[in-house]
Amino acid sequence: MLAVLAIAGGVFGQADPHPSGPTAGQPGTPDPGHVTARRLNRAEYTNTIRDLLGVDFRAQKNFPTDDLGDGFDNIGDVLTVSPVLMEKYLEAAEEISKRAIGADPLPAKPLEIQLQTKDRTARRLGPEMLEGEAHLDFDGDYTIRIGLPGQRDVDAAAVRLGFWMDGKLLDTKIAETKPSTLIYFDPYSDETMRLYLPAGDHVFRAGFIGDDFPSTLDPKDRFNRKKNKFPDTITLTGPFASKVEPASRRKILICDPNSGGKCVNWILATLARRAYRRPVTRDEVAELERFVGEAQANGQSLEQGLQLAIEAVLVSPNFLFRIEHDAHPTDARAAHPVSDVELASRLSYFLWSSMPDDELLALAEVGKLRPVLDAQVKRMLADGRSAALADNFAGQWLELRNLDVVKPDPVKFPQWNADLREDMKTETRLFFDFILRENRPLAEFLDARYTFLNDRLAKFYGIPGVDGPEFRKVELTTPQRGGLLGQASVLTVSSYPSRTSVVLRGKYILDNILNDPPPPPPPDVPALNEAAVGTEMSLRQQMETHRSEPMCAACHAKMDPLGFGLENYNAIGKWRKMDGKFPVDASGTLPGGKHFNTPAEMRALLVSQLPQFAQAVTEKMLTYALGRGLESEDEEAVGKITARWASGNYAFQDLIFEVVRSFPFQERRGEQVRNETARVGRGAAK
């Protein structure tokens, strides 16, 4: 492995010639900004491995957390490489290459993994369904044994048993559930399936499907073996040799490597070109061919040699980093367009958080990307991979990732659980994705009269008529909900574990909607009397007392009146009319002085502030797209993008097109040539 690292680390590629321009930073000369060569963050690494090799590798579970800068984890200046991360890269390269080719022999003795509730490796999703997570080290066939304790009435019909992996139904079979006629009957049976399963981390689920099974038993009898039958364990045994060829092998082995060196060269050249996201040199391919030869010289197979070459690719800086070159070797400060190949990577990692596909890279390699740039953006937004914008851009802009770490007080909020948390995330992700894909106007983020619900979240919201676990678009018929500020995800991440926070919610609105972030709080701010909230006085009364402190008044005068507008929602976003024993007063004012009395009135007033919201979203989107914080030189670009966007009624996809067309997205300059300048928006890395 050290040899792999030594050889792979020595090649950074050659710069393509570009036309150079005037030196950036000179008076009157536009400055597109400098983007640091940046490594792939965890989401980008995961997606790139998926698209390059067809392997499901979840870097979020295996690599250290990425640092944040300017609110995002794709900012080049903070994406450092620690010794721990380098070690993880080496381990990942070895694991991924083995899974991609599958040339190593399977274990001599099959392994067994059991998922069950008693050791917390599985959880129940009701009496009909069991779910658990497991990691498989090998692709192959596995025997799936589902334990079914209990029995049903003698007249009970057979039911269909299903087995799912990562939410996809893989197989079903008929399972008998009525009592046995045997005298000595232990009410426990197994149902067995044999399926091909890919290596990696997976969520497995087993349960009954169809309308004939859902139990009408009293809840206390649902797991009574004498009255009901239910899945109790999932046992996976394997791997066994399979006739199914992994998708990753089909993706990599584009010809038969045993046919000769020409095919091996083609495989490695194609792989390296896609992995490095640019044309590759003969020397680069020859270095990879050396690994194949050395493996064979050591008694390994040709395919094991290819695995070793893939390891080398995956630890190369050409793969791990997005490297852009300065155009003019004697004046690196010159502003210049990035090459088409570099632009292709900027575009794909912006919209997909992943590598360019073959169509995009092929256009870039012959210099024909810019003339068809709009058509490519349209194609890429229509592709399912653009869901990465919801996961990675919206997930950070709207702070939805914080839902994974919040821990609401279980005594005060007994409804909170992992399922509700995932429902909240799904609602907002689908909401964002719908506005993006349907090119809806920006104002709908603030006061849309629809959202996306399943039965569980609809019940939590008190919205009738939504049945079943599938999410679907639901029209809102009352003023209680609407837009982002009526969604439990946003309301939960802007609260404390034990209560709401008008400060956090007011700051959230100032930061993300009104583009007017408050300064950081002064040190030694006196804390609220938590025990008194809702008992001795309302939160509003407490905050009014708090604002009387001179050091607190200036900032709280802006934040608190906005936060009060969301007080009808408790700390996990459930509608309420009382704060403890006090009626909720949701009245407040916008910074300009406009008054509102309810959340619905506040949302309507925020829609009237659409230009401010548009500028906030533009700055966030441009920061994310560029992978760097905005500086004073970017104010002109932000202004132009926002003005053009406004001319189209702020249709959301139009913002994507304007960012891609913008000067800083299509150009770059070299080394820093001036002192640190003032930032636009958030500023320093966090």
Image (cartoon, rainbow, N blue to C red):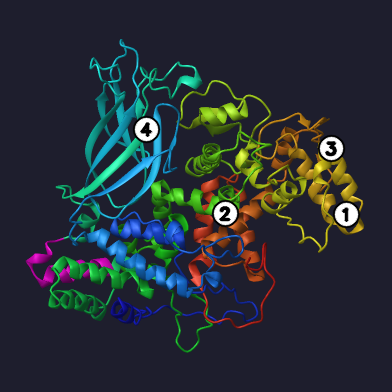
Which of label 2 and label 3 is nearer to you? 3
As drawn, the label of residue 232 is 4
The region drawn magenta spans 255-272
Q: Position of residue 312 (x, y in %)?
A: 29, 73
Residue 685 sits above or below residue 487 on the image: below
* Residues at marks 1 and 4 touching, judged by CB atoms closer than 8 Å: no
Name the main secondary structure of what is drawn in magenta: helix
Mark 2 — residue?
A: 396
Residue 507 sits above or below residue 226 on the image: below
**Left/right of residue 571 with respect to residue 594 in the rendered view:** left
> Relative to the observer, which residue lies in front, 332 or 474?
474
Mark 1 — residue?
A: 553
**Left/right of residue 624 with respect to residue 385 in the rendered view:** right
Nearest to N terminus: mark 2 or mark 1: 2
Q: What residue is drawn where x is 33% and y is 67%?
A: 93
Label 4 secondary element: loop
Which quarter of the rendering shows the N terminus?
Answer: bottom left
As drawn, the label of residue 538 is 3
The residues bearing labels 2 and 1 have C-alpha atoms spaced at a distance of 29 Å
Q: Amino acid at mark 3?
A: Ser
Q: Residues within 10 Å of mark 2 (few under 14, many from 20)?
A: some
* Residues at marks 4 and 2 touching, judged by CB atoms closer than 8 Å: no
Nearest to N terminus: mark 1 or mark 4: 4
Residue 224 visible in the snapshot: yes
Label 2 secondary element: helix
Q: Amino acid at mark 4?
A: Asp
Which of label 1 and label 3 is nearer to you? 3
